[in-house]
Image: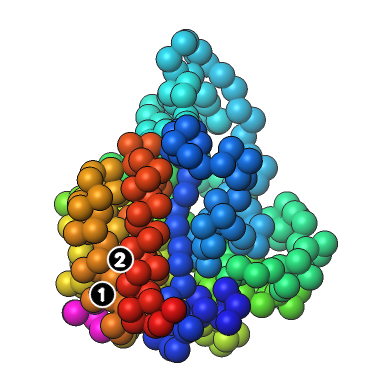
Amino acid sequence: MTKRQRFIETVTFGSPDKPASGELFGFDATNERWVREGLPADVIDLEKYFDIDFIVASPCVNVNLEPIPAYPLRVIEETDQHIIEAKGREVVRRKKDQSGPGMPQWLSYPLQSREDWETDWKWRLDPDIPDRLPDIEARVDEYNSQEYPLGIWIGSSYGYMRNWWGVENVSTLFYDDPALIEEMIESITHLSLQTLKRVLSYGIKLDYVCFWEDMAYKGGPLISPAMFKKYCSPYYRKVMDVVTSTGIKVALVDSDGDIRQLIPYWLDVGINMVMPMEVASGMNVIEIRKEYGKRLAFFGGIDKRALAGTKEDVRKEVVPKLEACFADGGYIPACDHKIPPNVPYENYLYFRELVNEVTERFYGG
């Protein structure tokens, strides 16, 4: 069975030869530690080295859904510890060392008024700008013949607006100017729909689409479920009409935080997979599977904090989740976000051993 077939069979509760494997590698500091602890220094592709089936970030169809043309980047301040950069009205402070976990600090956001949106932002979301699909014609055969599941990041109903305005500003905007919220979502919808249709027009065979939201935190959603239903659900319905009518079988939402209140609304519009299931935010993949059964597949859900503990900590975290989820399918075991540099290489190898151990028990050698 190919990696693409195994992915589809796994997350649609079919009959894979074994569950698809996945991971969220990412931090340079983690890789550097693992090399010091035994990972061969010449390993460039960790996915191939660990025989991973599903890579969320890539390979995906190369599309650019950002505002185009982008504002030029300029440096405002630079010290030994940080750098402050600006693009238009957006000002961000970043740590100089970006090799490990850490978030930049936004000092101001790109949009600060309706006028900003109308005069300097909306037109940059035109889906027909050539740079949206910079190399697609030359890569059609490559996309359709690759071994990994092929997806596309197709947009965001809330996450983009949060990035443009900031959480506090966009939260009040839902009350102060709901018409502007509707106008922005309409533009986002048009961008997502037309980009997806253009990609499909080249004959590219997609296995999944991925929506990026990050619309929750440890305490729950950043937008109320009622507002999600009113403002965001129409976006999803329009995009999902194209997804389902063209035979794409998997629609995945990527959102950190506690998404439990949002899951019913995603299911209602056709989403059938979520990630990364952050344990620190209360996301327990065993309990949520009991509630939704085979209506929803999961990627992630393994507590990265446990992987930094003892081997017994790793076993207690991994084995019960795999046993519960492998019994019914629809689950790709992986860390609940990028693997931080406090995870020893030996522990990650042990995690992979446990995945193989439980897989053999359920699916044979």
Circle 1 residue: 323
| Image coords of residue 285 (percent x, y) | 24, 68
On screen, residue 263 above or below 77: below
Split into 4 quadrants, where in the image is the N terminus?
bottom right
On screen, residue 294 above or below 50: below
Going from the N terminus, do you reach mark 1 or mark 2 first?
Answer: 2
On screen, residue 113 above or below 177: above
| Image coords of residue 59 (percent x, y) | 61, 60
Q: Amino acid at mark 2?
A: Phe
Q: Give the colour scheme shown.
A: rainbow
C-alpha span from label 1 to label 2: 34 Å
- Name the mark nearer the viewer: 1 or 2: 1
How would you rate the neighbour count of disc 2 (Cα within 10 Å): few for under 14, some for 14-19, many for 20 or more?
A: some
Circle 2 residue: 228
Indicate whether residue 291 is drawn in magenta.
Answer: yes
The answer, for residue 227, to whether it is visible in the render is no
The answer, for residue 288, to whether it is visible in the render is yes
Between 272 and 51, the one lying in front of the other is 51
x 48%, y 45%: residue = 26
For the magenta stretch, what is the residue range?
289-293
Indicate whether residue 2 is drawn in magenta.
Answer: no
What's the magenta bit mostly, secondary-structure-wise? Answer: helix
| Whether label 1 touches label 2, CB < 8 Å | no
Q: Amino acid at mark 1?
A: Glu
